[in-house]
Image (cartoon, helix red, strand yellow):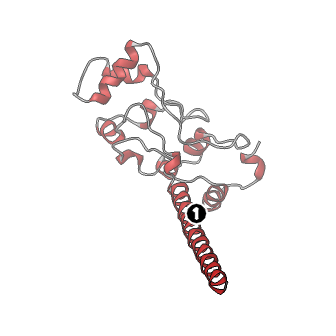
Amino acid sequence: MVQSIGAGRSSGSSDTDQLGHTMKFFLIGLAAGFFILFLLIRLGISSRTEQPISFNHKKHLEQGLECDSCHRYFKTQSFSGLPDINVCLECHKEAITKSPQEVKIRQFAKKEEEIPWKRIYGEPDHVFFSHRRHVVLGKLSCQTCHGNIAESVRPPSRPWVNMTMSWCMNCHTKKKVTNDCLECHE
């Protein structure tokens, strides 16, 4: 009888050890999962945007094009605009390079489709932002908000600058522009 009780304790202790061991691996795995999720969110991997055409800003600027050649409204309206197919076809109706990216332009045109550019910059609905106000009146360069876009050989997959309210307010303070709420918030 003594052996039975002793054997039972040994088995119970083993079960407890096994449960503790399993729980330890579960908690380590859970912590590692949260850490990986944090990194993915922090690095913005989940928010990367791929454009339908890998547009080379640097090459086009070297050819003498200016920002308003493609973003036609940034000096006159709140939204700068994205290039429509006809803007691209002004130069690329016929092949001028052997780039597969250039071929895509003519493929969209042949299907009578606009190039489905994806916006990567945006403000919440309650925020009003005007390119005209910032570029023409405020005399800000594109680089202030869009980084060194002139040197980019492919479109950015996410915003170069995280335009938070504090980022905007710091810029307004440096430029000695009002930080009155109603200037930007509707």
**What kind of residue is marked 1?**
Leu
Q: Which type of secondary structure does the marked residue at label 1 adopt?
A: helix
Q: Quadrant of the C terminus?
A: top right
Tell me residue 19's x, y (percent): 61, 70
Which residue matches tag 1? 30
Front-lying residue, 12 or 25: 12
Q: Quadrant of the N terminus?
A: bottom right
Question: Left or right: where does residue 118 sit relative to residue 4?
Answer: left
The residue located at (31%, 17%) in the rendering is 93
Tell me residue 160's x, y (percent): 48, 51
The residue located at (54%, 64%) in the rendering is 29
Tell me residue 62's x, y (percent): 29, 39
Rendered image quadrant of residue 28: bottom right
**Residue 104 appears in view:** yes
Q: Image height check: is 88 above or below 1? A: above
Residue that extends furthest to the left in the rendered view of this protein = 98
